[in-house]
Image (tube, rainbow, N blue to C red):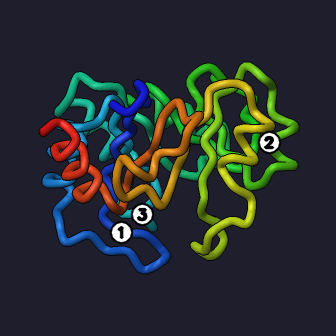
């Protein structure tokens, strides 16, 4: 992968911002399993997910599973791990448990400054409140955060991977991203 960036391939059939995949969950899973270092499975129904899909995915791959969702309560982290997730995305807060198994997604740069330095961070270019682009950028987040940092949202091809990203989460554009990987290999 580009500069050894980990690919977190997301199985996303829809979003609350108008995205709807033409592919089935199974088709997307197959592609995610083919190109991803980690498979991201949504737990939130607004993104076509459920905790049961983590259990299903765990039976279909030996790759690590990221439970992707807001996970506003620590109980949801426990549930995701019990369903087979290896990692859990937590948005807008620092959990009291399993920080070593969580990827923390701050809502803004001010929140990023409050996160313990040993945590792994996901910087989402999308505002989760309305689906628009954030004004704060990945580059600004990278300047503030010296540790592990994952770029998320609006990644269509490998050309969209920002310098300094340790990982990328690719969802809505998974098929196009996979094609760009094949093109690079040729």
Contact (Cβ within 8 Å) of mark 3 with mark 2: no
Q: Considering only vertical position in the picture, is 167 above or below 176?
A: above
Q: Which residue is mark 2?
A: 112
Q: Nearer the viewer, residue 185 or 89?
A: 185
Q: Nearer the viewer, residue 94 or 105?
A: 105
Q: Quadrant of the image for the C terminus?
A: top left
Among the two numbered marks 3 and 1 on one chain, the one whose residue lies closer to the N terminus: 1
Contact (Cβ within 8 Å) of mark 3 with mark 1: yes
| Cα–Cα gap, marks 1 and 2 | 28 Å
Q: Which residue is mark 3?
A: 47
Q: Secondary structure at mark 1?
A: loop
On screen, residue 130 versus residue 45, left or right, reads: right
Quadrant assignment, res 163: top right
On screen, residue 117 versus residue 78, left or right, reads: right
- The residue furthest bottom is 18
Residue drawn at point x = 60 percent, y = 41 percent: 122
Q: Which residue is mark 1?
A: 14
Q: Considering only vertical position in the picture, is 5 above or below 13?
A: above
Residue drawn at point x = 62 percent, y = 26 percent: 148
Among the two numbered marks 3 and 2 on one chain, the one whose residue lies closer to the N terminus: 3
Residue drawn at point x = 37 percent, y = 58 percent: 156
| Cα–Cα gap, marks 3 and 2 | 24 Å
């Amino acid at each position: 992968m580009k500069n050894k960036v980990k690919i977190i391939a997301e199985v996303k059939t829809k979003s609350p911002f108008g995205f709807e995949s033409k592919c089935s969950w199974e088709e997307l899973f197959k592609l995610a399993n083919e190109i991803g270092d980690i498979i991201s499975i949504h737990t939130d129904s607004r993104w076509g997910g459920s905790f049961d899909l983590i259990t299903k995915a765990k039976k279909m791959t030996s790759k690590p599973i990221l439970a992707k969702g807001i996970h506003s309560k620590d109980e949801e982290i426990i549930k995701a791990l019990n369903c087979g997730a290896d990692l859990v995305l937590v948005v807008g807060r620092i959990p009291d448990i399993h920080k070593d198994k969580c990827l923390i997604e701050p809502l803004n740069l001010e929140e990023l400054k409050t996160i313990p330095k040993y945590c792994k961070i996901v910087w989402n270019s999308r505002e989760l409140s309305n689906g628009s682009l954030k004004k704060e950028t990945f580059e600004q987040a990278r300047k503030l955060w010296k540790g592990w940092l994952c770029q998320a949202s609006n990644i269509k091809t490998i050309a969209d991977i920002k310098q300094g990203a340790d990982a990328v989460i690719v969802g809505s554009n998974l098929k196009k991203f996979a094609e760009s990987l094949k093109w690079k290999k040729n």
